[in-house]
Amino acid sequence: MKKRLFIALAVGTVLVSSCDKVELPNIGSVDTNTSCDTVFSFSTPTQSNRNVLVEDFTGHLCGNCPGAAYELELLHDIYGDTLIVMGLHPNTSFNVPQTGSGKYETDWRYEEAEQVMAEFAIPSSLPRLMINRTESTPPFFFFNANQLASAVPAVMGQAADFSIKLSGSTLADRTVCAKVEVELLNTMSGSYSVVSCLVEDSITDYQTCYAGQHPDYTGAGDDTYSNYTHRHVMRDVFGHYGIVEDAGATPLTGSIWGDPITGTTVAGDIKQFVISSTPMDAAWDETHMYIVSFVYDDATKEVLQVVQTKVAP
Amino acid sequence: MLLIGFTNPVLGQEKAPKKIDLGEIKGNISAAFQQYQEDSAIGAAVPEEKSTLTAFTNLLYTRGKVSAGIRYESYLPAQLGYPDRFEGTGLGYRFARYKTDEVDVTVGNFYEQFGNGLVFRAYEERLLGIDNAMDGMRVKAHFLPGIYLTGMYGKQRFQFVDGLVNGSGLVRGFDGELVVNELLDSLSGLSIDSLPSRKLNLILGGSFVSKYQADDNPGLILPENVGTWAGRAKLDYGKVSFNAEYAYKINDPSGDNGFIYRPGHAALMNLTYATKGFSISLDAKTTDNFSFRSDRTAELTDLMINYSPALTKQHSYNLAATLYPYGSRPWGEVAYQGEVTYKVPKRSKIGGKYGILLTANFAAVFGLDSTNLGEDIDDLTSTRQGYSNNAFFMPGKEKYFQDFNFEIKKKFTKTFKMVYTYFNFFYNNDINQGAFDNENKGVIGNVISQIHVIDISKRFKKKHNIRVELQHLQSKEHLGNWATVVLEYTYSPHWSIGLIDQYNYGNPDPELQNHFPYINIGYVHESHRLSVGYGKQRAGLFCVGGVCRQVPASNGLTITFTTSF
């Protein structure tokens, strides 16, 4: 009698244990043991047209650079958030920190900005700009400030092949977690990658500004303005954190080339990436932080879509 | 019974002949031959072979506690409208069984049902081409009075290609049933003859069924083992009977539910009161995300592990049974049914010499009262729940189906009787998708129809019987009005001849106001039956027990033969 009962209970136990409950079904789900397991609320996805990314190579000792920044402000007034700007401070003479005078002591330089500058053969005389990383005069990718007014409108309003939506939040250790969702609007035959950058906006610090470059900064005999507002300063390139959907390639942690879009590239495909920054420097104002994510063509390097969203505190 | 006698040659003159029991073989054969003709007027389909043969032969060998059986099947090819996974000829079912009072073990194929079938039902419905027989092992145990245990493990029959082909998923389950009175009787120690007659009878049961299917999806983490369990009770108290079952299923993403991970629920209740000349029956059912298959990508009636009975009356009159039948919705529904039967007593003023039997039935099926969660289920942090159910067992706003019908059955003399039946159907074709217009496009919206049927039967002399059915369907939607006449003559005990004509005289396109005549002659001799039919059959849904199959229009000859031995 006891033996029979035991057998029945054993059979029942085996059967009852034959259930797999799945909490997070989607592959690429955030590992629940890691710190970026957080709830994201996406930004509004990009529309059917391409946004435009302008990368502004600049420096605090560059007296002509505020002119380019001003030109970009004027264009932003026209095109709104479809124009997204990132200021890159490469390791050139214009960004060397000064010592002893109390001026220009901030070190704006960022290694990845230097890498981008080198990869695209940007001359060290600034300001130089890239517009969607398209070639200006082949094989060169850079534009001069005086070309912005015509070159930016020329690429505005193009039909998009990708849509991006984006979300980001800050952890207690000031790491920024982000999730990028890329949707293919058309079936594509090439290979593509996604890059995400952390950007700090509106930092007040020293800047050299020559006369006539920016109407807000005039009158200083030595062209030095301590109250200059530095816009859209690239602070970090996001490294990969989670498992890339359709995993297969090893993520390039923190690379300026970002993460590859793997698997099929058929219209309607959705690719998600969970990524994180290194913890933010204590001096960075987390209320001014943005994430800029863009998709580019691996072959031509051209930026095909870009989106920007504010980091939730 | 095959009993063969042998005589011992040496001792033959001294002892009686010794008989050796070689066992018993029983069987039956069923074959249907159909020859098809083209008929553009009704869009009749013709297979390349022009004709089909669908045949089944069951052989059952029994010797003492051991039995074994096979079913030889032929689909050469299968008749039109059958699932396209049946072809060739070979063994489709085979088993061996050992059965005593305490243990019943089956290896090979078997059919089985736990409770009302909410979590498990392996069955065959040949008319629909459904056969989800298990192929594996089943053990039934009855060691203690009142306690019945069943365990099973195996795969499900999926298709037939010159033989049985199983689906890839595994199904395993366990069911226990406690017949309380039987247990109490055994504990009382009284003999069967002296047991008290109990007014209250109670049966309790529980089931657990799990399936396994490998996760081969690159985009999702799929549960490879999915379990479902159910509890049930049946209570009889005098003239009242109550039967209820509740079932729960853990996350089971599938093609049926759009690969959401929400758990499933189902419940079934029936309350019956019956006394002399009067009965009332009330039913309620809900299923919520409760489709359960051994292959999560299977469709239609393939590889169903469980069964969701339709809570609507199954009709037999042609127009009521074939034009707007209801099939259970796999994603979920809430259904109610009530039926009252009253017999006006014999020899009363109204009832006359034989009385009048009155039956009224009402059934309604609704969608779930649910809220779409509006989540991005492809989002990495999504748990893919899909929707929430606002009120269990309460109907949603969308009505799927409604059937009100009542029947008056009156016997006037020993040889003459008449039945009048009225039907009122509400058929949501956006959900049921069984109504197609003249261009063979699905009708959008609801179809409302009313049917009147008069069924007259008259017996002449002793062996002659004539039955006439006059049916009329009225509808402003779909194909308009229909009329059907059935004439049936039976010459007992061997011959019968029947003629049916469906006439779509209300079709909006006058050129498509077709007749669908069909004549059938049958001959019965002992256990053998031969039937020959010729005529047209309309395209439409064919349903049995809430499970439906789409059948194409056809025109041609049908010969069926059945026998048993």
Image (cartoon, coloured by chain):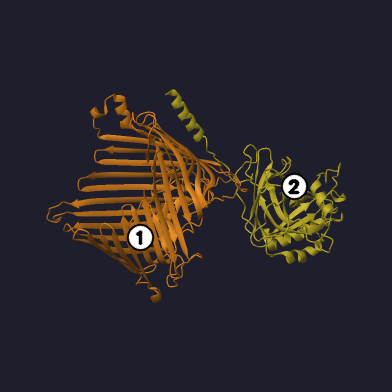
Chain colours: A yellow, B orange
Residue at 74% x, 47% y: name it. A237
Q: Which residue is mark 1?
A: B531
Query: In the figure, B82 relative to B234: above or below?
Result: below
- Depicted A252 relative to depicted B560: above or below: above
Task: Give B345 or B14, whichever is nearer the viewer.
Answer: B14
Image position, residue B298 (x, y; %):
52, 51
- Please provide percent x and percent y for residue B261: 53, 45
Chain of the residue where label 1 is placed in the rendered structure: B
Q: How packed is label 1: few (under 14 Cα within 10 Å), some, or many (20 or more)?
A: some
Q: Chain of mark 2?
A: A
Label placed on residue A237? 2
Task: Identify residue type, mark 1.
Answer: Ser
What residue is at 24 percent from the left and 32 percent from the top? B197
Q: Nearer the viewer, mark 1 or mark 2?
A: 1
Please tell me whether mark 2 sits on a helix, a strand or a loop. strand
Amino acid at pointer 2? Val
Residue B399 placement: quadrant: bottom left
